[in-house]
Amino acid sequence: MHLESIRTSSRAALQSGMTFIEIMIVIIIMAMIATGVGMAILPGFERAKIKQAKSDVAAMRSAVQLYLAENSGKCPTIEDLKNERYVDKSKKTIDPWDQEFIIRCPEGDDPEVISTGPDKQEGTEDDIK
């Protein structure tokens, strides 16, 4: 009878833990779930950056127009806008991709404020004006 109780307790000890294969399966399942969540969330972050850039470009364009009206049409730089307090120093003067806005003042036309967008290169289709 003593031998049977030893066998029963050793079988219970062997069956109580998880095997390496079971642990690996759980880790793979968790990685797949994390990948799916990441794939669902990342496009939302990019859309939010684009929306923020559009809002920042519009605010910067208003500041440029005000500067032009008060300074005889001299095209400002970002530094001019900050120093003359047309743009609050606490406001960001860079786009969501950490690039400075580009300011252009074409002769006889409205000023342009441009964010180069996600690719950080001017003149591409993802530029935000």
Image (cartoon, grey):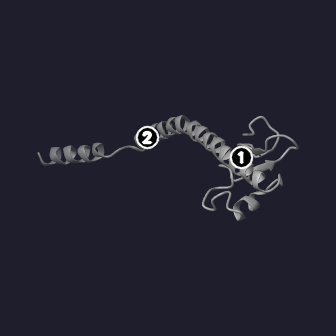
Q: Which residue is mark 1?
A: 61
Seen from this angle, which residue lies furthest left? 1
Q: Which residue is mark 2?
A: 21
Question: Label 1 is placed on what type of residue?
Answer: Arg
Q: Secondary structure at mark 2?
A: helix
Tell me residue 48's x, y (percent).
58, 41
Q: Is residue 44 left or right of residue 93?
A: left
Q: Could you tell me which residue is drawn at 83 percent across and 47 percent down?
A: 105
Q: Could you tell me which residue is drawn at 20 percent across and 43 percent down?
A: 8
Q: Is residue 33 left or right of residue 108?
A: left
Q: Secondary structure at mark 1?
A: helix
Q: Residues within 10 Å of mark 1 (few under 14, many from 20)?
A: some
Seen from this angle, which residue lies furthest bottom? 83
Question: Label 2 is placed on what type of residue?
Answer: Ile
Tell me: residue 83, above or below residue 124: below
Quarter of the figure that contains the N terminus: top left
Viewer-side residue, 89 vs 19: 89
Quarter of the figure that contains the C terminus: top right
- Return the disc, 2 or 1, that comes first in the chain's sequence: 2
